[in-house]
């Protein structure tokens, strides 16, 4: 066992063959290449896992990543799944860029769904063009209200926004539980924990007959465009960027930090709230206990995989969405446990964080000194 | 003559061919949609045991586990209906609306929804088990075995199914021991070992020496084993997880129903129905009784089991009073299925309020 060690010493020891050097500046090319590297490594590692589990790796990967989106229906499902992820991640990127760690998007989504669902229930037996805009607005306001709690606590009482926003997720889920079990439960529903179905006027219109993709995707696309504009064309975007790099610098420059913190939380909450609206007025059509399969948490992966860049987030949301669909297809057709989907999501984030090492360090090949 | 011979030969070939095609088409495939992991040793695990019984009967099966009751359920259902499955069992209440929605689009596929009440299309059936019959047995055991007269009960969600279980359990316990109190802790989850364990600990701290559960994990019986109190297995025989604590388990036995329904699809005799089976039909099974139970209790339980099966005894026989003392079921009467299906009030002797 001595020999391999010595070989390693040749690489890493006194007489280095490869040297790890700190970069003067984080490389911009690497910044956008590492997500692709992370996805590639995830595919390789995923294939390896399939192989170890006794499945043919290429066939499994095909059922995971190609079969689910091989037809129009699959594509529609992909977009349906990616829409809330993209919307929430765009909102989160406002917070993350400016060093505000909003972990509670799931709670803001839930509360947005509660408020908009409540409004939709008010109109349950009415039809009218004005209902949907009110319902959508209510969802955005609900998300904003809920996000303002950690923001205000952070700015005025110096609390840790990670903890506050995270704990509020569970509070919002309990509120939802309480409402669908108690006061808002369907009077004709045998006391089961769900509300009435919303009226058709409170539902987002479908884009194609027979497919589930709905008008919520326009909200996501609008968020992408608006966020790009704010990030790169406004003073607010510049302030966020500076605060993100160094809070001290931002203070020194005289930026009104408190206002900005509250603003980014409000934007983030509105996006998450809208994602909640999209779920309940889109495919679900009522409130029940489970309006979101943890979109708010998965969107954190999406935001970082997309490098907090609006266009990057679009691609990232599609990549992460397909891990959900793929996991189902792989279980139906190959009996691969469905939870491998979560393994894939975890691996993507892991490899991304690991390959971020390359942002700040580079390998330098130097000849052996002999 | 010659031509006729060839013609009849060809037509008989065609006939034979159609026969084989028809026979192949009769290869019925069943699909199962699960809310949790197949390894939960509770609700989903037992449905999967039922699925294996369908496999053993010679049918092909597919399952998808961990399907959330969110917008994802509809996609999974449609994908299963679209990929050649003839009958789809959706095994959680929250799949009710997606099941009916997809059933409308696939009139040739049969849908079987567990624990729901909506049958909006002729190809949707519903089924559930009378678990409350099993809880009558557990209540009888708990009322006899308790020394502190405090019985703990970890409940999941305040829906009629769970309230019914608490009531039937308490009524049976009161019958053998009028002094008992049932303390409830709501875990607000069907499956979360951590939360369930916390709930069980809280009940033991309040003096409960028998713990019943209406959640699915094995955490509660394991906590009971450590604390040296009694418990009951839920959904599957949990004796191996806590041999000292578990007195018996109420098992959900879906296999016979599943095999029956898949066979009906194969024979073309499937028709819509609403099934609510109990101990008598074998959908609810009482596991073997622990030897710590005195012999007379064991024989009492066996007799009660037989009487529940034959219908001689009903879990909800009057007089039954609610917490405030109002009469719910008059003396000599039994609660009808309509009342059971919508039961949202505690009977006398249950502590606390139903969370609203």
Image (cartoon, grey):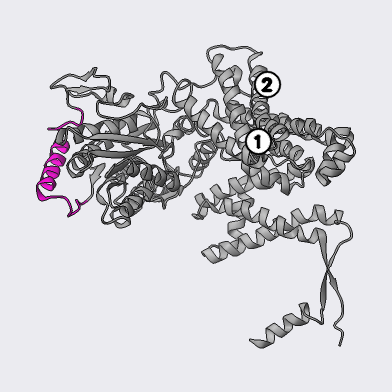
From which residue to which does the magenta span run?
B288-316
Indicate the quadrant containing the N terminus of chain A: top left, top right, bottom left or bottom right: bottom right
Q: Chain of mark 1?
A: A
The residue that disc 2 covers is: A137
A303 is higher (above) or lower (below) than A118: below
Is residue B308 visible to the viewer in this orientation of the structure? yes
**Residue B227 numbered tag:** none
Label 2: few (<14), some (14–19) or many (≥20) C-alpha neighbours in 10 Å: some
Q: Residue at x 17, y 32 (%)?
A: B178
Give the quarter of the image for residue A162.
top right
Residue A354 location, quadrant: bottom right
- Looking at the picture, how far across and down is residue A295, in whole percent? 61, 39
Left/right of residue B311 with respect to residue A185 in the rendered view: left
Residue B128 position, x and y percent, is 32, 35
- The local crowd at label 1, few if under 14, some if 14 to 19, many if 20 or more residues have their Cα within 10 Å, is many
Question: Is residue A242 shown left or right of residue B136?
Answer: right
- Viewer-proximal residue among B254 and A170: A170
Q: Is residue B315 magenta?
A: yes
Task: Give the residue displayed 32% in from the left and 38% down from the top.
Answer: B153
Q: Secondary structure at mark 2?
A: helix
Distance of mark 1 from mark 2, alpha carbons?
Answer: 16 Å
Would residue B57 be seen by someone viewing this image from the given angle? Answer: no
Which of the two labelled residues, at mark 1 and mark 2, occupies the earlier sequence position? 1
Q: Position of residue A77 (x, y in %)?
A: 62, 38
Depicted A125 relative to depicted B352: above or below? above
Query: Which residue is identified by label 1?
Result: A84
Residue at 19% over, 33% down: B179
SS type, badge 1: helix
């Amino acid at each position: 066992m001595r020999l391999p060690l010595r070989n390693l010493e040749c690489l890493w020891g006194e007489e280095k063959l490869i040297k790890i050097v700190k970069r003067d500046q984080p490389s911009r090319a690497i910044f956008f290449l590492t997500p692709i590297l992370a996805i590639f490594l995830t595919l390789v590692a995923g294939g390896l896992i399939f192989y170890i589990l006794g499945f043919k790796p290429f066939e499994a990967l095909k059922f995971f990543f190609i079969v689910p989106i091989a037809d129009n229906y699959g594509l529609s499902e992909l977009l349906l799944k990616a829409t809330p992820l993209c919307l929430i991640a765009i909102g989160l990127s406002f917070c993350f860029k400016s060093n505000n760690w909003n972990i509670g998007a799931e709670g803001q989504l839930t509360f947005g769904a509660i408020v908009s669902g409540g409004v939709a229930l008010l109109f349950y037996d009415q039809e009218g063009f004005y209902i949907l805009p009110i319902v959508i607005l209510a969802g955005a306001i609900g998300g904003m209200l809920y996000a303002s709690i950690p923001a205000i606590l952070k700015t005025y009482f110096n609390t840790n926004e990670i903890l506050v926003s995270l704990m509020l997720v569970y509070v919002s889920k309990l509120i939802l539980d309480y409402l669908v079990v108690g006061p808002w439960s369907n009077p004709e529903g045998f006391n089961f924990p769900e509300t009435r179905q919303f009226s058709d006027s409170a539902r987002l219109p479908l884009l194609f007959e027979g497919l589930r993709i709905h008008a919520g995707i326009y909200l996501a696309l609008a968020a992408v465009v608006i966020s790009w504009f704010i990030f790169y064309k406004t003073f607010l975007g510049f302030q966020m960027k500076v605060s993100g790099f160094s809070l001290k610098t931002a203070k020194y420059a005289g930026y009104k930090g408190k206002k900005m913190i509250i603003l980014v939380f409000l934007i983030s909450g509105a996006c998450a709230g809208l994602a909640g609206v999209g779920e309940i007025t889109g495919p679900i059509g009522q409130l029940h206990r489970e309006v979101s399969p943890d979109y708010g948490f998965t969107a954190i992966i999406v935001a970082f995989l997309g490098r907090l860049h609006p266009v990057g987030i679009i691609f990232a949301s599609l990549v992460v969405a397909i891990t959900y669909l793929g996991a189902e297809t792989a279980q139906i057709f190959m009996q691969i446990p469905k939870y491998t989907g979560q393994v894939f999501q975890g691996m993507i984030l892991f490899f991304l964080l690991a390959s971020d090492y390359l942002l700040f360090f580079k390998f330098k090949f130097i000849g052996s000194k002999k | 003559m010659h031509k006729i011979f060839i013609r009849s030969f060809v037509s008989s070939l065609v006939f034979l061919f159609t026969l084989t095609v028809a026979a192949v088409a009769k290869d019925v495939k069943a699909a199962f949609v699960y809310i949790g992991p197949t390894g939960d040793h509770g609700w989903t695990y037992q449905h999967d045991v039922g699925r294996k019984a369908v496999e053993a009967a010679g049918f092909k099966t597919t399952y998808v586990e961990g399907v959330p009751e969110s917008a994802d359920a509809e996609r999974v259902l449609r994908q299963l209906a679209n990929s050649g499955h003839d009958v789809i069992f959706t095994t959680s209440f929250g799949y009710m609306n997606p099941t009916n929605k997809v059933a409308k689009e696939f009139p040739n596929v049969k849908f079987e929804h567990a624990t729901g009440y909506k049958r909006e299309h002729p190809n949707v059936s519903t089924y559930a088990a009378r678990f409350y019959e099993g809880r009558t047995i557990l209540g009888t055991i708990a009322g006899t075995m308790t020394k502190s007269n405090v019985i703990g009960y970890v409940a999941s969600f305040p829906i009629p199914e769970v309230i019914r279980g608490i009531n039937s359990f308490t009524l049976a316990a009161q019958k053998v021991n009028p002094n008992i109190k049932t303390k409830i802790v709501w875990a607000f989850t069907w499956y979360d070992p951590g939360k369930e364990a916390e709930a069980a600990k809280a009940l033991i701290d309040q003096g409960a020496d028998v713990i019943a559960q209406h959640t699915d994990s094995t955490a509660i019986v394991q906590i009971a084993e450590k604390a040296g109190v009694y418990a009951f297995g839920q959904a599957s025989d949990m004796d191996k997880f806590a041999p000292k604590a578990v007195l018996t388990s109420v098992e959900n036995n879906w296999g016979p129903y599943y095999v029956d329904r898949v066979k009906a699809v194969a024979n073309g005799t499937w028709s819509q129905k609403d099934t609510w089976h109990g101990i008598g039909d074998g959908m609810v099974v009482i596991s073997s009784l622990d030897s710590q139970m005195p012999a007379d209790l064991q024989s009492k339980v066996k007799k009660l089991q037989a009487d529940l099966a034959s219908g001689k005894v009903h879990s909800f026989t009057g007089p039954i009073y609610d917490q405030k003392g109002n009469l719910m079921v008059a003396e000599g009467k039994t609660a009808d299925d309509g009342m059971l299906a919508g039961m949202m009030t505690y009977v006398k002797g249950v502590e606390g309020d139903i969370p609203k």
